[in-house]
Image: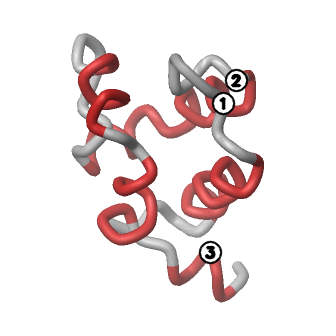
Amino acid sequence: MSEQQAGLSFERDIRPLFRDKDRQRMEWAFDLWRYEDVKENAPAILQRLEDGDMPCDESWPPERIEQFRSWMQGGMAA
């Protein structure tokens, strides 16, 4: 595990990537600002980010997707 992976946390590094409107659009399924929800759905979220389906209005740049992937690979710290 790299230092970057080990150092990423949901509250500091991942949650801020999701905007208020992203959260509102996904509320029917889960809360993007809730650690437990994102951790439980992380593989599906990553797939949608990679496919460009999420967020709904524009794709994330590759470095954001990589940050999310690194957080997953690093153990998904809260």
Discs 3/1, front: 1
Tell me the element at label 2: loop
Q: Nearer the viewer, residue 74 or 52?
A: 52
Q: Quadrant of residue 52?
A: top right
| Rendered location of residue 35, percent (x, y) | 28, 50
Tell me the element at label 3: helix
| Rendered location of residue 66, percent (x, y) | 71, 55
Q: Earlier in the sequence, mark 3 or mark 2?
A: 3
For the point 61% across and 36% down, which residue is it? Answer: 46
| Rendered location of residue 5, percent (x, y) | 62, 75
Discs 3/2, front: 2
Q: Earlier in the sequence, mark 1 or mark 2?
A: 2
Q: CA distance from mark 3 to mark 2?
A: 23 Å
Residue at mark 2? 52
For the point 56% across and 24% down, which residue is it? Answer: 54
Residue at mark 1? 59
Q: Quadrant of residue 77?
A: bottom left
Q: CA distance from mark 3 to mark 1?
A: 22 Å
Q: Residue furthest top?
A: 28
For the point 44% across and 57% down, which residue is it? Answer: 14
In the depicted structure, whether residue 76 falls above or below residue 23: below
Q: Quadrant of the N terminus?
A: bottom right
Q: Quadrant of residue 32?
A: top left
In the depicted structure, whether residue 15 falls above or below residue 9: above
| Rendered location of residue 39, percent (x, y) | 39, 45
Tell me the element at label 1: loop
- Circle 3: residue type: Gln
Q: How are the residues colored?
A: secondary structure
Few, some or many residues within 10 Å of mark 2 (<14, 14–19, 20+): some
Q: Circles 3 and 2: CB distance less than 8 Å?
A: no
Q: Is residue 1 left or right of residue 57?
A: right
Residue at mark 3? 5
